[in-house]
Amino acid sequence: MPRSLMISIALVGLILSLTSIFFLDYTLASKVLVLGIDQVSFWNYVTQMGDSKWMALLLIALWIGGFSFGRISPENPLWSRLRKKSLLILAAVAGTGILVMILKVIVGRARPYMGDIGFFPFTFGSEYASWPSGHATTAFAFAVAVGLAIPVLRGPLFILAILVAYSRMALGVHYLGDVIMGATIGSLGAVLIYRALAPKLGIKT
């Protein structure tokens, strides 16, 4: 992806997020909120797919598996590739996640359930950590990084990432502007980290 295209995507994502914040978020929030217990249970399940903890555990397990089987069968290049790609995907998810955690504190946007439509910069606490969405960031970073490493999984993971992003609004913990920015940071951040680390790990891009 050319640098100019990445800059354009970043600007479009930021503009869409800001437009949503000023014109859509507060009106849309109540319209997408789920109320029934069955719906809440379903979207709670979906939203867990964007939790970085299980992604980290999965990727660490794959790295350990690749390392272990690589020792047992060093002539098979599959294990080395598995180890390197799992490390690369983990770096993409962790790197974008750290950036978003810093932005959350700096911006300090109140979550929808707080009933306060303001911004409280440099406020610590999950109640004021709405922008950007961490789950959306993680889901899209994972989808993009895995898609770059294993292209056949790109489509299904993007669909899952979109569902995770929507679940954050449906459960009343994020606004549309939050998930747009999270998706933008996750996607572009994953591309940048993948490109930076892939040559160092001997992975073709």
Image (cartoon, grey):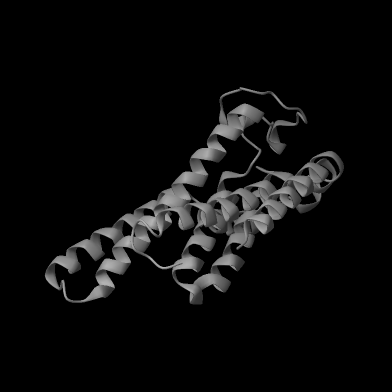
199 or 177, which is in the foreground?
A: 199
19 or 4, which is in the foreground?
A: 4
Image coordinates for residue 175, horizontal then vertical, percent = 72, 44
Q: Is residue 60 above or below residue 108?
A: below
Q: Residue at x 62, y 44 (%)?
A: 133
Q: Residue at x 54, y 36 (%)?
A: 101
- 92 on left or right of 125: left
- 35 on left or right of 54: right
Image coordinates for residue 178, horizontal then vertical, percent = 69, 44
12 or 66, which is in the foreground?
A: 12
**Is residue 36 at least partly visible in the picture?**
no
**Is residue 126 at least partly visible in the picture?**
yes
Report the quarter where the N terminus lies.
Answer: bottom right
Specify the quadrant of the image occupied by residue 164.
Answer: bottom right
Image coordinates for residue 108, horizontal then vertical, percent = 65, 28
Residue furthest to the left: 72
Q: Residue at x 19, y 68 (%)?
A: 70
- 84 on left or right of 192: left
Q: Residue at x 62, y 31 (%)?
A: 127
Q: Is residue 156 above or below residue 141?
A: below
Q: Is residue 90 above or below residue 108?
A: below
Query: How many numbered discs?
Result: 0
Image coordinates for residue 79, horizontal then vertical, percent = 25, 70
